[in-house]
Amino acid sequence: MKKLEEYVLTIPDFPEPGIMFRDITSVIQDPDGLKLAIDGLVEKTRDLDFDLVVGPESRGFIFGVPVAYLTGKGFVPVRKKGKLPRETVSRKYDLEYGQAEVEIHRDAVQPGQKVVIVDDLIATGGSAEAAAKLVEDLGGKVVKMLFVMELAGLNGREKLKEYDVESLIVYPGK
């Protein structure tokens, strides 16, 4: 079986010149790549005391749900503003150009619950930080953040320095 990073296709100059786009869809469309990614994330939770998995829309759903299932935990989605049907709390975060806002159901995380946040990619860390702050707004504690890939050149770890962050693949550039 190949290594996980061998399933990631790199597309040069997408979406603009100079960017090396790391395509997660090439990982999840291959059964072996998908298995390596999910198994790798689950392994990072071994011996970790936690109650819930939280995943930001949308690729956090792809990776978070199987991690929750395989660890016997519930899954909580963090969605774009206006997508959740019940009472929510929200957080804004900065994008390269502008802002975005995400929400979580107000009753999704109970005070004192320990949470693992799972997503496909850490770049600048903005969306992961917003998800973590939502968990904390509800009284939960983020005990770990797990990512399939990390673009270390965008310094997302710096924004998340107060959290335990692990990535299965780390790319040095952007």
Image (spheres, grey):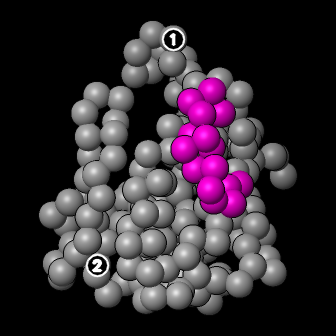
Nearest to N terminus: mark 1 or mark 2: 1
Q: Quadrant of the C terminus?
A: top right
The residue located at (56%, 30%) in the rendering is 154
Image location (x, y in percent) of residue 116: 59, 71
Left or right: 163 as drawn, with respect to 39: left
Q: Quadrant of residue 36?
A: bottom right
Q: Residues within 10 Å of mark 2 (few under 14, many from 20)?
A: some
Left or right: 157 as drawn, with respect to 76: right
- Marks counted in the figure total 2
Left or right: 20 as drawn, with respect to 60: right
Q: Nearer the viewer, residue 136 or 44?
A: 136
**SS of the residue at dot 2?**
strand
Q: Nearer the viewer, residue 76 or 143?
A: 143
Please name which of the two marks, 1 or 2, marks the residue nearer to the observer: 2
Residue 158 on the magenta segment: yes
The residue located at (43%, 63%) in the rendering is 133
Residue 76 on the magenta segment: no
